[in-house]
Amino acid sequence: MSNVDQLIARTLGITEDRVTDELEYQAIREWDSFGHVSLMLALEEAYGVAVDDDLTLALRSVAAVREFAGGHTPEPATGPGHGAGERRTVHRGLEGVSFDRTTITRIDGAAGTLEYRGYSIHDLAERASFEEVAYLLVHGELPDPAALEIFEKELRAARALPAPVLDLARSLAHAHPMEALRTCVSALGAFGPRQPHGGDESDEQAREAGIALIARIPMIVAAHHAFRSGREPLLPAEETSHAEAFLTALLGERPTPAAVRFINKGFIVHADHSSNASAFTARVAIGCRAGMTAAVTAAVAAFGGSLHGGAAERVVGLIDEVGSPGRAEAHVAELQSRGEPVMGFGHRVYRTQDPRVRQLRATVVELSEERGDTRGLDILDAVAAAMGPYSRHGVAPNVDLYAGLAYRLLGLPDDLAVPLFVVGRTAGWVAQALEQQSNNVLIRPLLDYVGPRGRTYPEAGR
């Protein structure tokens, strides 16, 4: 085996017999985004050549890496699945494939830009309320004062949960919050307005159902947490904002202004992120005419997976694993040597720092100072500094890095990190589902069959 094959096997943590020309990025678990960056750094060190973004995109198969090691520059790749013949048409994970057009969210991964309906995430996070942003996503424009007042009243009126759903949440007090949330969101479908004959919701009915979900999902999270904490849910005062009402119900007491500001900002930066896995799932479901509640239930289910929103819960453990700022470099080196990712870093879209990080870190600084506890912040900042070499290749801090620490500073358990993300993201799922329904086409991709053909069923007695 050649030296480059040994380097690939060692860096990815796989056996050398798996290093073949057909092996490609994302084809195996070990060659994920973090493994790819680790491989690029190993190639830089071994061959003394800086691997830029174009080369990083080109070196997405063993064949391309071997060509590079032989002194040749491989052709730039346009997406995964760049083998010979008909495999060129296969895009594993649909990476790089645009399946429709949108007016909701614009992301420029190279520049680190995130906009909702044309408005910078930084302007919205620093100046808007979550209610304004939810209206923007659902209706397409920022509300004037009169429209905002009506929308806020709609949200407040929809907060109350049906008694059977509250009873269901109580019965699930033993369950993980995401399991309880998914089950209770699904149950809401049995207590909403009856759908017309044939089951199809009109656009207006879907919008009304979506607004109700934006209001009720926070109350499900808060009620379930109250029940498992041995208390009854505390109903917030009617006139409180969306963020304050949620925190009051969740904590069982009135929150501090800093906590409300964090939750409001957190809901805004989490509200949408274009066609991520859960938004795509919502579009597939409503594209089948399953209805808004079914679409959001499907999105919640997808979001709970460990490769999507579920990662947020695991990031909080990074603070405990590192222990102190002085251990950050050694911890990163240990994980890299084992080919394991550092949680809270890297994103499939951004080639630079996730723009949402700036907003969340600022609120974590405020909360840390309010609580007189900067230990967690110091550890995460030290890990971010230790990850500096990886940031050149797109493995920079992502939205999960600082969010979990903020929840700890609020006195919340780590397993609420993902449900709290869902509370903000619901507005985006509703917007995505409404856009899909407004100009619907059934989403039905193909699979490239590569299995055996023409097999004969065995004769009797064999």
Image (tube, grey):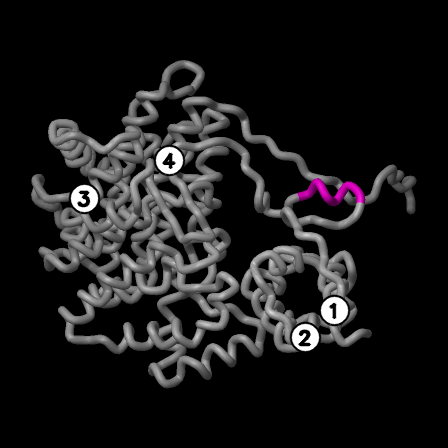
Q: Residue type at mark 3: give it.
A: Ser
Q: Which percent across, then down, holds residue 189?
A: 35, 32
Query: Is 399 part of what is drawn in magenta?
Result: no
Nearer to us of marks 2 and 3 is 2
- Dot 1: element: helix
Question: Which labelled disc corresponds to residue 104?
Answer: 4
Q: Which residue is mark 2?
A: 47
Inter-mark Cα distance, 2 to 4: 44 Å
Nearer to us of marks 1 and 3 is 1
Q: Could you classify mark 2 by the number of other residues whose Cα lies within 10 Å: few (under 14), some (14-19), or many (20 or more)?
A: few
Q: Residue type at mark 1: give it.
A: Ala
Q: Which residues are magenta?
A: 85-90
Query: Is 89 part of what is drawn in magenta?
Result: yes
Q: Residue type at mark 4: give it.
A: Ile
Tell me what residue is drawn at x 38 percent, y 49 percent.
113
Q: Which percent across, then down, holds residue 35?
A: 59, 66
Name the N-terminal-most of marks 2 and 3. 2
Name the N-terminal-most of marks 2 and 4. 2
Name the N-terminal-most of marks 4 and 1. 1
Inter-mark Cα distance, 1 to 3: 53 Å
Inter-mark Cα distance, 4 to 3: 18 Å
Name the N-terminal-most of marks 1 and 3. 1
Q: Locate residue 330 relative to residue 244 in the image: left or right.
A: right
Tell me what residue is drawn at x 37 percent, y 16 percent.
196
Name the N-terminal-most of marks 4 and 3. 4
Q: Which residue is mark 1?
A: 69
Relative to residue 278, is residue 390 depicted above or below? below
Q: Which residue is mark 3?
A: 129
Relative to residue 421, is residue 415 depicted above or below? below
